[in-house]
Image (cartoon, rainbow, N blue to C red):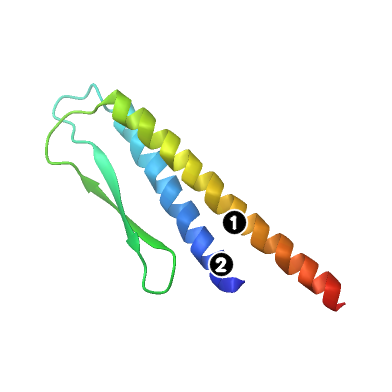
Amino acid sequence: MFGLASIASSGLAAAQLRLDASAGNIANMNTPGYRAQRVEQQASSNGGVEARVDRVPQAGVSLEKEIVEQVAASHAFKANLHSLRTGDDVLGRLLDTRA
């Protein structure tokens, strides 16, 4: 279960990073020459994901892309939170059974 908690929390952190980057992009979309931030995610060797923020090559922000990014990141956050809660519930029931 500790692996599940680690994997889910790395997913929560990555989703939060995606939301933060997108919010910053929207806040700065009218800034001349602003280059949007994108979060790159990849599987981690110990489970979960590793996320890092990069700048896109061209200047400009697409509001439509940012809205889609925020919805997708929100769903990813909720899915990871659900996994974490389910794991906690399973562990609680297991402890109740063993007690």
**Pick the front one: 71 or 36:** 71
Residue lying farthest bottom?
Answer: 98
The reply to whether the C-beta atoms of the residues labelled 2 and 1 are less than 8 Å apart is yes
- Pinpoint residue 69: horizontal percent, then vertical percent: 36, 36
Q: Where is residue 59 drawn, in percent x and y?
A: 14, 32
If the image is split into quadrants, where does the C terminus sit? bottom right
**Residue visible at 52% across and 59% down in the picture:** 9
For the residue carrying disc 1, how many other residues have a C-alpha within 10 Å: few (<14), some (14-19), or many (20+)?
Answer: some
Q: Marks 2 and 1, how far apart in space?
A: 8 Å
Residue carrying label 1: 83
Q: Quadrant of residue 71?
A: top left
| Residue at the image position 65 percent from the left and 63 percent from the top | 87
Q: Is 7 situated above or below 19?
A: below
Of the numbered discs in the image, which one, if any, rests on residue 4? 2
Query: Mark 2: which secondary structure?
Result: helix
Q: Position of residue 15 (x, y in %)?
A: 44, 48
Q: Is residue 31 left or right of residue 68?
A: left
Q: What's the amino acid at mark 2?
A: Leu
Residue 95 image label: none
Which residue is depicted at the point 40% across and 47% down?
A: 17
- Residue 81 visible in the displayed image: yes
SS for callout 1: helix
Q: Quadrant of residue 31?
A: top left
Q: Is residue 23 visible?
A: no
Give coordinates of residue 45: x percent, y percent: 36, 73
Residue type, numbered disc 1: Ser
